[in-house]
Image (cartoon, rainbow, N blue to C red):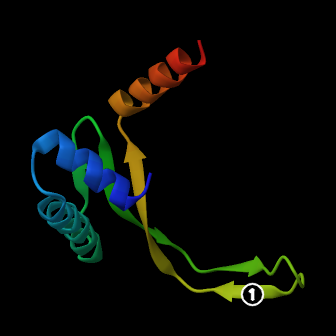
Amino acid sequence: MTKADLVDIVAQGTGLTKLETEAVIEGFFNSVIESLKSGKGIEIRGFGTYKVKKKNSRYARNPKTGEKVFVPEHYVPVFKFSKDLKMSVDTGMKEAQD
């Protein structure tokens, strides 16, 4: 599903125009990004949690050449799914297979 597909679905469900819906979705994405950039996590009950995880510096290997490469310390966004979301997806996929 693309962002355009998401905009279409939300617009149909809410009665908002596609332009208004796109602005809301962009606002949500920007809010998540800004929170993560400032080191704050976001918890959406029944959906999941966004947070930032620190990765320590290390040596990795270039798969093409086999050469060792230094990877500096960096931060990555992570998303942890809620139990409700996991169960819902599992149930839906099992029902779709039957």
In this rendering, position of residue 40 left or right of residue 6: left
- Residue placed most toward the observer, 51 or 32: 32
Name the image quarter holding the C terminus: top right
Relative image position of residue 66 (x, y in whole percent): 89, 81
> Label 1 sits on what residue type?
Val
Given the current orientation, which residue lies at the most extreme right position? Answer: 65
Q: Residues within 10 Å of mark 1 (few under 14, many from 20)?
A: few
Residue pictured at 46% horizontal, 19% vertical: 91
Asked which secondary structure carries label 1, the reply is strand
Residue pictured at 72% horizontal, 80% vertical: 59
In this rendering, position of residue 29 left or right of residue 88: left
Given the current orientation, which residue lies at the most extreme top position? Answer: 98
Relative image position of residue 17 (x, y in whole percent): 12, 56
Q: Is residue 8 above or below residue 92?
A: below
In this rendering, position of residue 76 left or right of residue 72: left
Relative image position of residue 33 (x, y in whole percent): 28, 71
Hey, which quadrant is residue 50 in on the image?
A: bottom left
- Residue placed most toward the observer, 2 or 34: 2
Hey, which quadrant is residue 3 in on the image?
A: bottom left
Residue pictured at 87% horizontal, 80% vertical: 64
In this rendering, the count of numbered labels is 1
Question: Residue under circle 1?
Answer: 69
Relative image position of residue 21 (x, y in whole percent): 16, 58
